[in-house]
Amino acid sequence: MTAVSPSPASTVPAFCEGIQYFGEASPEFEKYGATPVIGQGQSAIADPSDASAVYQTLLYADALRYLILQMTASKASGHPGGFASQAEAYAALVMLGYKNIMTEVGHHAPGFYCAMFLDRSLEAMGIATVQQLRDRFREKHGLLGHLSGYIPGILAPAGPLGQGQHFAMSAALLHPDKLFPFTVGDGGMGEPYPMSSMMHFHTAYPSATNFLPMLVWNGFSQEHHSMVSLQSNEAMTAYWQGNGFEEVVLVDAKDFDDQDQPGAYVDSTAFSFAQRLAFTQAVLVAVDKAAQSALGGRLTVFIIKQLKGAGVHARGAKSHNLYAQHTLDNPDIVSALKQRALSIAAWELIRTNCERASGGPAAKTVVTESVLPLADLGTLPLEEYAIGGDPKVSTTVMGRIVAAVGQADPKFVVTNADGNEASGIANINQALKINHPTTDPLYNQQPGGQVYEPLSEDACAGLAAGLTLMGSRTLWCSYESFAINGLPIWQTVTQAMAELRRPTPSTITLFTAGALEQGRNGWTHQRPEIEAYFGAMMRNGNVFPLFPPDANSIQICYDWALTTHNKGIVITASKSPLPLRVTFEQAQQALQEGAVVLQEILSTESPDAKKVVFAVVGDMTLIPVFEAAAHLEAEGLSVRIVSVVNPRRLYRPQDVAWETCSESDGRFLDNAGFDRLFAGDALIGVTGGASNMLEPVMLRSTSKRDTFAWKRGETTASPGELMAYNSLTAELLAKRALELVH
């Protein structure tokens, strides 16, 4: 297409301000582009084989390529190549009326932003012109380098590979009448989780086929050829079929090439205009077929095979990223923009189709732009146990409440890697049933159950976190040792929730079987370092690790978590019977102030006796601390034992980015309250996990202080022996306390 000088400003639509080059009208524009193919009051094209629909879909694909390249080149930064290689497929989805589109590929972000611009979604964040699109790309409070929950019309974040399918499956489960396509790149097919998670999901929810993987098979990864670049079409089809996909719809640009391009991967933008239309028609018809198949109950994948970088500044992996030299004055950028330049009339036509598709801008129509109605939980069956009564298993007590939540809310899902019974929460399985194709009462399993049990922690965390992001309630249960395998997507979702433009239920976890309970299993089952992950995340502002010391406090913690929005709440508790230490009222205080005093021993020998304060994270770690307190009391010291339940409350407000969070929580314990709990002559922090969970206390304390924390795992016969291996003994605690006060 020949680039020409812009027309007088009075003839250029306002949204086109900032477009660098306009072009002449495409061939036969008067015949196929005179009228928007999506008419007034319509939400999709009527016939994917209609010549005008094909023609206008191709114009839309070129508009996406043009905007992607101009936007990224305006900052000489960003990723144009991957999305460009499937622009026809994305354009086909929109023209067919589908806008609930997600991605597995954070590097596709520029394409999604340009699509949101063209349908006017970005006007909700003050981006109404191409110039503003350019200005706000990769800027604070603008269009982030990768997708986030901050952008209007974008359903889910995208950054780390291996996550997008979880969001699509979650949305599909909650909205069975809608299609949720998601793009996945061949460079990301090496991730171990996507295929296995889709297979487990399909086995558990065989009717939820309304998610549609859109494989962008372009031959290249980020910096080199993809590992599947040598596969034949037949082998790729067989791979998906072998993993349970009933319908594999593949369109190969090579079949339409009339320019004798070498290799298996070709660029459709180099074809003659007639062949470009033929290729676009094939994509449009194939996408329609795949969408109808997925909505019709068949597990389906759509594959578009086209060279990476089709229609932008470079081809192959070289098109993946822009570098400092790729400014708007760079010859390669200028040449590509001029080749993709569209006429003013074409831009107006494309804008109209995009606005009308799917009933309006994505920012007003996609499922994540409104709050999902939730079932009323009523009054939950909390039961307060008498302090000093028979020891209780905290997890089992919480399990009873979890069961009640599931019985009141049919959308509620509990995920666990096949270990609820081992975690003392068999009562959850008994009440809600494991979702399994084999009915067996002995194992509490049946089709349609509310407990989702893949063996992959990524799949557990993915569905649980994805459902909460989409607006539903969930609980992810895991052994503390293994949860690390699911944390990347949980972290992604909690970060997205901090930016989200709507309230959604917090993503809640229950981590059990801590290191101290796993002595005989050795270090493979002793990984409390995971707490360092949450310790760091607390500063984000919306992450709340909770450490209830007993069966009363765990009920209060979970009850509170259910009332919150846009937060990541981690409940860590033992599966062993432990003493009851606090009332409901004290547990509420601990939740709101961060900690609660469990024991205050005042010296009977002298009112001026030195005071030792223990700040304790966890429940089993309290056992040696109470023993140490008895030793110190015998030495004539005063002792206070404080259970740190909600350490996030113990930071100072300036330590945490709470004010930047959606549904922000700015409650922190003031200095007077902190001194009431932790002031003394010596302070000893004690945790069976990572030491940085005690940072809020150590940061504020002015006492002489020290920390006792987990060091490493070992095979032992008892929790006491394992604690001794990590210096968590009453003798060593008391000894250090005496050293600090003398």
Image: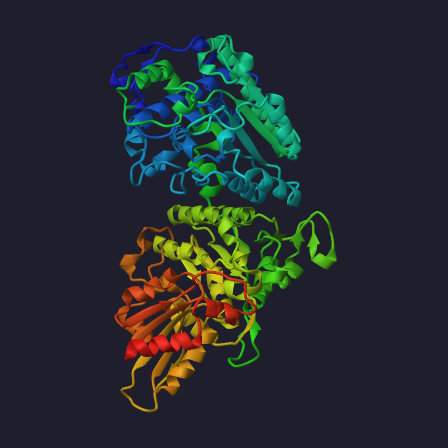
Residue that extends furthest to the bottom in the rendered view of this protein: 605
390 or 125, which lies in front?
Answer: 390
- The image shows residue 643 at horizontal and vertical percentages of 41, 72
Relative to 706, residue 88 above or below: above
Q: Nearer the viewer, residue 87 or 222?
A: 222
Q: Residue at x 58, y 37 (%)?
A: 195
* Nearest to the observer: residue 720 or residue 640: 720
Which residue is found at the position 40% from the left and 22% from the top? 65
State whether residue 351 appears in this view: no
The N terminus - image quarter: top left
Total number of numbered discs in the rendering? 0
Q: x, y (%) of residue 36?
A: 46, 19
Which of 240 and 158 lies nearest the eye of the viewer?
Answer: 240
State the image quarter where residue 316 is shown. Answer: top left
* Vertical position of residue 492 compared to residue 276: above or below: below
Where's residue 92, x and y in %? 51, 24
* Residue 630 point in image, percent of width and height: 42, 83
